[in-house]
């Protein structure tokens, strides 16, 4: 057993524990904290894959911003406390589908061949992402920022309309 394997097992356990807690907890705030735990475990796995840029983005965007947005969304909406009951047949079908998906992905990962270029992927990873983003993909990068701006303005307009409708008798 190498140290790398031990760290992987530790991060795997953190990620899976967070995911299982997310599914099984009943309070929404506790669920969100379990989701943050899952996101942090995934960021650690990205670091092990020498994808430091993706790990930092995972922590900043998902563990921070997305979690806060989800919390605000949950707190601002009405939801009932009643949970629907699921039968054993439905749980068995879900377990079968998840197992089949795992086996297919596992077989695909075991048989994939990345070729000789895969050895250079981890060298200067963040620099490579930055160069690609601001040279080859600068137009799509800017278009995404425009789309996000339009979505933000649209959300503000929709929220303003709901607020004005609430004021009218």
Image (cartoon, rainbow, N blue to C red):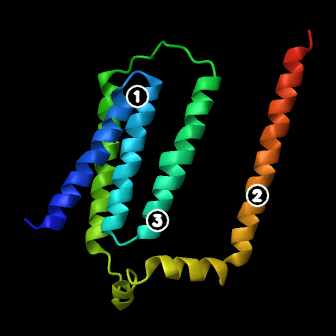
Which residue has dot 3 on it? 54
- Tell me: residue 35, above or below residue 50: above
Mark 2 packing: few (<14 Cα in 10 Å), some, or many (20+)? Answer: few
Q: Quadrant of the N terminus?
A: bottom left
Mark 3 packing: few (<14 Cα in 10 Å), some, or many (20+)? Answer: some
Which residue has dot 2 on it? 147
- Spatial CA span between label 1 and label 2: 32 Å
Using the image, tell me which numbered label, if any, was put on residue 30.
1
Give the SS element for disc 1.
Answer: helix
Measuring from the top left, give residue 12's x and y in whole percent: 25, 52
Q: Quadrant of the C terminus?
A: top right
Say if mark 3 contacts mark 1, CB within 8 Å.
no
- Tell me: residue 23, above or below residue 6: above
Q: Earlier in the sequence, mark 3 or mark 1?
A: 1
Q: Earlier in the sequence, mark 2 or mark 3?
A: 3
Measuring from the top left, give residue 2's x and y in whole percent: 11, 67
Give the SS element for disc 2.
Answer: helix
Furthest residue to the top?
Answer: 169
Mark 1 packing: few (<14 Cα in 10 Å), some, or many (20+)? Answer: few
Q: Which residue is drawn at the image coordinates 33% and 45% (left, top)?
A: 98
Residue nearest the viewer, comparing 13 with 118? 13
Q: Which residue is drawn at the image coordinates 51% and 50% (left, top)?
A: 62
Say if mark 2 contacts mark 3, CB within 8 Å.
no
């Amino acid at each position: 057993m190498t140290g790398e394997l031990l760290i992987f097992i530790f991060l795997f356990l953190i990620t899976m524990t967070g995911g299982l807690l997310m599914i099984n907890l009943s309070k929404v705030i506790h669920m969100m904290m379990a989701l943050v735990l899952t996101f942090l475990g995934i960021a650690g796995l990205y670091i092990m894959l020498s994808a430091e840029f993706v790990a930092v983005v995972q922590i900043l965007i998902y563990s921070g911003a997305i979690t806060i947005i989800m919390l605000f969304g949950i707190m601002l909406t009405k939801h009932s406390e009643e949970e629907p009951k699921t039968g054993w047949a439905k749980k068995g079908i879900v377990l079968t589908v998840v197992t089949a998906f795992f086996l297919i992905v596992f077989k695909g990962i075991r048989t994939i061949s990345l070729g000789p270029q895969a050895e250079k992927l981890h060298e200067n990873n963040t620099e490579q992402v930055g160069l690609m983003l601001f040279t080859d993909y600068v137009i799509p990068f800017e278009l995404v920022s425009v789309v996000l701006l339009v979505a933000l303005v649209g959300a503000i307009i929709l929220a303003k309309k709901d607020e004005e409708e609430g004021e009218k008798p």
